[in-house]
Image (cartoon, rainbow, N blue to C red):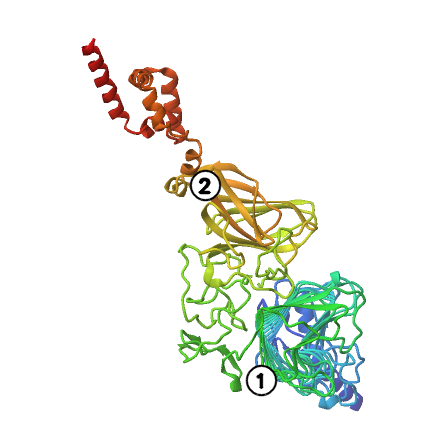
Amino acid sequence: MELLNKKLKVVFLTGFLILTYTPVVLCITPPVVYVAGNGSGDFNCSGENDHIPINQALKFVTENPGYTTVYLKGPFTYVIDDTLLIGSNTILEGDSNVTVKLVRNAGWSSTKPLIKENTSSSHNITIQGFTIDGNREGNANIKSGDGYHNLMHLSDCQNVSVYDMHLINNHGDGLKTDNCSNITFCNNEAYLLGHDVLYASASSNVEAYNNRITCRTNSGLRLYNTNHAKLYDNIITSEGSGGVGIEIQRDKGSMDDIEVYNNTIYETALAGIWFFSQGLDSESATNVHIHHNRIYDTGTVSGNEVIGGILSVGFNAIIENNVIDGAYGAGIVQNDAFFSAPAGSGYTVTVRNNIITNTRTSAVGGNGSGICNKLTDTHAFILQNNSLYNNTGGNYMGIQDPLSDIIVDPQYADPDKHDYHLKSKSGRWNGSCWVNDNITSPCIDAGYPFSDYSKEPEPNGNRINIGMDGNTWYASKSEFEVLNNSSDNNGSSDDSDGHEGDESHGGHESHGSSGSGSGSGGAGGSPEPAKNVEVKELSQGFITNDKNIKFDFTRNATCVVYVGFYAKKTLGKTTTIVEMLKDKSTLVSELPSGEVYRSLNIWVGNGGIATSKNIENPVVCFKVEKSWIKDKNVDQSSIILNMYNDTKWDPLSTSLSDEDDMYLYFTAETPGFSSFVITGKMVEEEILAEILPQPDPQILEQNNGYIGSDVEKKPEQAGNTKTENKKTENKKTGNASIFEKENKDLPGFEIISCIVCLLSVLLYRRK
């Protein structure tokens, strides 16, 4: 009897466990499967070994196509002692008061995460809405950063989304991806993780945005040998030993197309942004674009070289329209702070439209300079229209002072509260409305002249502001409005990307560019002042070697129709700019001879790229109004394009190519691109040179008989066919006949005729 009772107890317990962990499939309503901690779910947990029913639910969804979602009901903490396995086409979602927590003293290996893919090549995985707790305190016997207890680790997966999550308190990464693609990591909050919050390794097409991150160690967001990534609108700081805000690392293969923008990074223990390469060639570490970030008080750990606002080594990059305030060590620096610099040279970082202020010294990391190059033999900066102020170690170290930067107080709205909007008498955005200040920042309308400004509110001065609000809807307004004659053009192209990725336009020397290219490049000289630009138009294209390239200006903002040439090298995405000027260019000393139709500048790409080494057979197609030709009485065959070349004007070979009701179209062959003037000659000037000398009156008196009879005969010649044809031909060409001019120019023609007649009558009567 006692044995029977024991058997009944075993059966009862077994049945209970089966009922607890096995769903009644017929009762589950698609597409959602619910997991609960109080018996109300399709699968139910008890607070111990909760990975078992959750994995059963995940497996059920994977195996039944009519189901999509495993939903964790709250308010419960689900304690797991094994990895949760998520399959393709599956959503793991939970209430905001749900926590999935690692068991105490888990004893897991260093490669075992809390959540991973069910099988290799999984796809369409979404994790959203709940908290994952790595239980750092309950697993204190292991070291952070050695791969233990990653909250999520996915390999060889496609289409991964993690959002609205709360990630806390572990020894490893928040989300690590190996060889994955199409990854979205957004609207998450991460607090004191043991390694990187997002670690994308050998992955592609990564987006991370709207995350709030507090680092304990290592980085907030990290890319490693990863391409095509956008990191934006994140807020990143650190506590304790902390780490880097954003880390971009390459050691093999190509790594490019990385955009980091609109982030706020502050009080990180190490650098705000750190990008570095350990590879062998600069071509494989390109196209990093860092713009419109607010970075302040970064690099607080004095005993480390990986500090500063932005730290770079071994990359080609563009850093523009950022504010870097109060960084330790340096504002922007190129330095092999942790790893040795890669082999080779030619690594160039373009720094434009940034404000760098109040940089501080660090015991190990630097003397507090604004922009610093510690690798001058292999690395270089191109500096264009930055503003620097009150940097402890000076504004530049290892760099020649550029002409286009300004050293001036930028007039922040409230630096103590890290409000880096620029003061303006005409209007400043304060976060909720526009307000007016009693002073206007010198950084307004002081940015790189070829940068897009189309997003700035009116009045915008037709020029970008320096700082993080440049070319945004929140840019402080210009004190004076600059009006274009063409109401349909705002002075820039329709393409608002900056940022555009990788293109830049270079500065130009004050005397004008020579015929060999688009400008002197370098640190960006003194280009055309915005106040002298009536209107400008941009055209973008991709320059590929062995191709005929054409930049069309379809908005008809200027007199230039297109610019073309044959490309000898691949130069990538390039912007060509035409500026139509109000007056003669400030880059030239004088105007060429002739009647001036238009003065203009044409710049192609980054400084120095449009050279004979890279392009050949450049041409400019332009148009001239027929009404101007008529009003000025200009001979259309005299219309030419003049190019300013080495302090003098060179007339270019120009030919008429087409016409319509309003314009004549011309094509000119040019040796390069710089300042140009379109001119023509007036018709009257040419005709006067052809007029015969006036006859001597004394000769007329001596031969009055002959002249008189000749003059009397001339009216009879009105019917002369040859003369009539000549008159008709001259009317067609717009020229007055020389014959008519001779008659008009004979002095006293009618008087002499009368005198001759009277003398003839008197002589006849005497006879």
Camera-nearest residue between 670 and 99: 670
**Residue 536 appearing in the image:** yes
**Numbered circles on residues, count:** 2
Q: Quadrant of residue 402?
A: bottom right
Residue 333 relative to residue 751: left or right? right
Residue tagged by mark 1? Answer: 75
Q: For the point 80% across and 85% down, which residue is it?
A: 107
In the displayed structure image, the side of residue 25 where residue 496 appears, left or right: left
Hey, which residue is sitting farthest top in the picture? 767
Residue 156, above or below 355: above
Which of the labelled discs sits on residue 681, or is there none? Answer: 2
Horizontal and vertical percent for residue 719?
Answer: 32, 15
Q: Secondary structure at mark 1?
A: loop
Q: Quadrant of the C terminus?
A: top left
Q: Residue 734 lies in what quarter of the image?
A: top left
Q: Position of residue 308 (x, y in %)?
A: 67, 80
Question: What's the amino acid at mark 2?
Answer: Lys
Q: Nearer the viewer, residue 7 or 624?
A: 624
Q: Is residue 287 above or below residue 239?
A: above
Verify CB contact (< 8 Å) between mark 1 and mark 2. Answer: no
- Report helix, strand or loop for mark 2: strand
How many residues crowd mark 2 within 10 Å: few (<14), some (14–19), many (20+)?
many
Is residue 691 or residue 707 the one in the foreground? 707
- Residue pictured at 74% horizontal, 75% vertical: 374
Among numbered discs 1 and 2, the one appearing first in the sequence: 1
CA separation in Å, label 1 and label 2: 87 Å
Judged by depth in the image, the label closer to the viewer, 1 or 2, is: 2
The kind of residue tagged 1 is Pro
Res 18 visible? no
Vertical side of 378 occupied by 41: above or below = below
The percent position of residue 446, horizontal first and vertical second, equals 51, 69
